[in-house]
Image (spheres, rainbow, N blue to C red):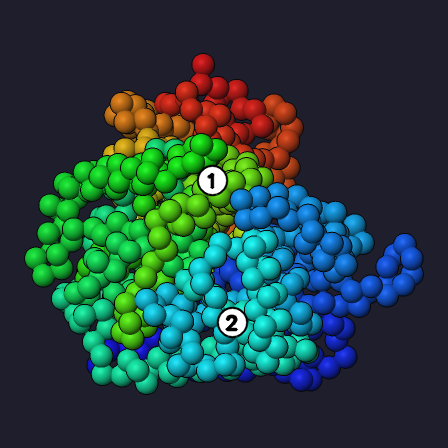
Amino acid sequence: MPKPIENQLLDNRWNAEIAAGMSESELLLYRSNILGSDKRVTNYGGGNTSAKVMETDPLTGKQVEVLWVKGSGGDIGSIKMDGFATLYMDKLEALKPLYRGVDFEDEMVGYLPHCTFNLNSRAASIDTPLHAYVPRKHVDHVHADAIIAIAASKNSRQLTAEIFGDKIGWLPWKKPGFELGLWLGKFCEENPDADGVVLESHGLFTWGDTAKSCYDMTIDVINQATAWLEAKTAGIAAFGGAQHESLPAGARRAVAARLMPVIRGLVSGQQHMVGHFNDSDTVLEFVNARNMRPLAALGTSCPDHFLRTKICPLVVNFEPQTNNIDAVLDGLPQQVADYRDNYAAYYNRCKHGNSPALRDPNAVVYLVPGVGMLTFAKDKATARVSGEFYVNAINVMRGASAVSDYVGLPEQEAFDIEYWLLEEAKLQRMPRPKSLAGRVALVTGGAGGIGAATAARYLAEGACVMLADINEDSLKTTAETLTARFGADVLRTVVMNVTDEDAVAAAYAHTAVEFGGVDILVSNAGIASSAPVEETTLALWNKNMSILSTGYFLVSREAFKMMRVQKMGGAVIFVASKNGLAASPNASAYCTAKASEIHLARCLALEGAEAGIRVNVVNPDAVLRGSKIWEGEWLDQRAGTYGTDKDGLEEMYRQRSLLKRSVFPEDIAEAAYFLAADSSSKSTGNIINVDAGNVQAFTR
């Protein structure tokens, strides 16, 4: 049985108790947030809401009408009060005589700051005239899948009339801007009883005299379209029916784990890209469908969808019935190159004399039959959101192709949106990427003090982090702390024993599926033991060697494999110890294993250089705070060795150092950051001692 565009109508989330006593602007915020909380209404960053509110003019003290409207680049689901632009309505009306026609409508954006109310610094969006010139107090503009399925149909005007009658009107495709704002105003004048309008290939405008009536209208119209589509598509095979069957979930992830590092390497020429994998039922239904390829080639219709997903996706030549993954990997470089060539040809066909330069010509969306969808972007959130937008596009194509013929944006219109000078100006205003933007790090021993501090340092510089540790409870606690600081998109965890070969390989596969690959390995998992040599058992010796030597070998070997597949270089950082250079009493197993780490790093630096893989070492000493290895017997043993107690041990280490300073996890993290960043791009095979000075550990 084919799946309907939605199997459940939208709930009306308006809560009268919550809304009671709110001002008009507060009701706008409330309405916006509950609309944006459901991705079936509009995607992240999509849609717009407004209210015309009577305010006191700060200069005259008189009441004036002010348009509150979502500011440029905002998201209605998460917007706060400071996310709205505020503009004098009388000044917005005064712009109309200044308008010189559609060929000059972009210049009208330059007038919007002159309409600002109360020195509001929030920039007004290009959609401002669309809200200003609708003569109703409250206006919603959303991109609901059910509505766009109608709007993107070949006969969308007739379907709109069939579903809504005179209640909801229809306007032909027009790029957002001043002209479309005038169209909407004229429509309202000519159709005073209409409650909204469907914009061809774009979305829905609805309005009302109160915040609640406007919200109710938006939900009701979307539900009416949803119910109509469900009735019309019942019993119809979606997308022409299935051509492929999905692989089992584990097999899908295994294929994605092999594809994503290769694709990531191929598309990261201009900047490091981060990947996202989606194998939801909605995606699988589409990628397995008979008509997937011709529909995908048409591209998306809604401008918001298009800007996030590019002119069209790349369909990977995978055959789930034969699992031809090796042949696919061999052919991927050519597939990606062909896509770039086709994109460049599209640019050259459509460009204008003043068009911005060609941007990254690689695909954003990759469709894999039997497996799912991969998306790549400059950061994890953008990759995820791009995938969400394409899921919306899938829903649109499902509905439109079932009741009519799906129609994507005409190529020239698509180009004019993608390379719109106003869009280019917005891109140019974006902040400069952080130093580790787009990088992916795997940190072992991630639940301990040094691991957690290093992860935090990387996350603060824009990296994504896979936090690995053998202690599941500590890993969860650390991850919760970091997620609260940096968000859920950029952090993942994996329970991993570094001495288990299969577990290590699985951790890298997990990292590939979650982020697309790996650029940085921080090998930090560790233990510590103390015993005179005659009391050092073989088991104790082997435990040190297994974790501190073999474990470092295993995680490095897998890092090298993935980095070589990506062909983007990489950075491997070993967190060793001062004890790897300077002998310490009653710790022969520990010191020898740490020395092994250091020499392994030197060997790997030789092997990785030709592939741009740098391998360096950080040597800490006496990092007591937050360290897991100082929580057990090691603390008692070292205190006993030096004839002090627990409280006196840190002071003893501080006084022993040349600088008479304690060493903290954040100090080690700073060194690990330097060795991962481009600022150390000419360093490999090196050792940084972070020990407050220990003459025995001087490398020369």
Q: Is residue 216 above or below residue 25?
A: below
The image quadrant that residue 84 belongs to is bottom right
Q: Nearer the viewer, mark 2 or mark 1?
A: 2
Residue 370 is left or right of residue 41, and the answer is left
The span from disc 2 to disc 1 (Cα, nearest Å) is 41 Å
Residue extending farthest to the top is 700
Depth check: give the residue in front, 566 or 321: 321
Residue assigned mark 2: 197
Image position, residue 112 (x, y; %)? 69, 49
Depth check: give the residue in front, 216 or 442: 216
> Which numbered circle lies on residue 20?
none
Q: In the picture, which quadrant includes the C terminus? A: top left
> Which numbered circle lies on residue 437?
1
Residue type (three-letter) at the residue carrying disc 1? Ala
Image position, residue 675 (x, y; %)? 45, 30
Q: Is residue 89 above or below residue 196?
A: above
| Element at label 2 | strand
Image position, residue 225 (x, y; %)? 42, 79
At a point 64% along the width and 49% down the height, the residue shown is 99
At a point 23% along the width and 48% down the height, the residue shown is 259
Image position, residue 576 (x, y; %)? 41, 34
Q: In the picture, which quadrant includes the N terminus? A: bottom left
Sequence-first tag of 2 and 1: 2
Residue neighbourhood size for the residue with mark 1, other residues' Cα within 10 Å, grouped as few (<14), some (14–19), many (≥20): many
Is residue 658 something one can see in this rendering? yes
Residue type (three-letter) at the residue carrying disc 2? Val
| Element at label 1 | loop
Depth check: give the residue in front, 620 or 611: 611
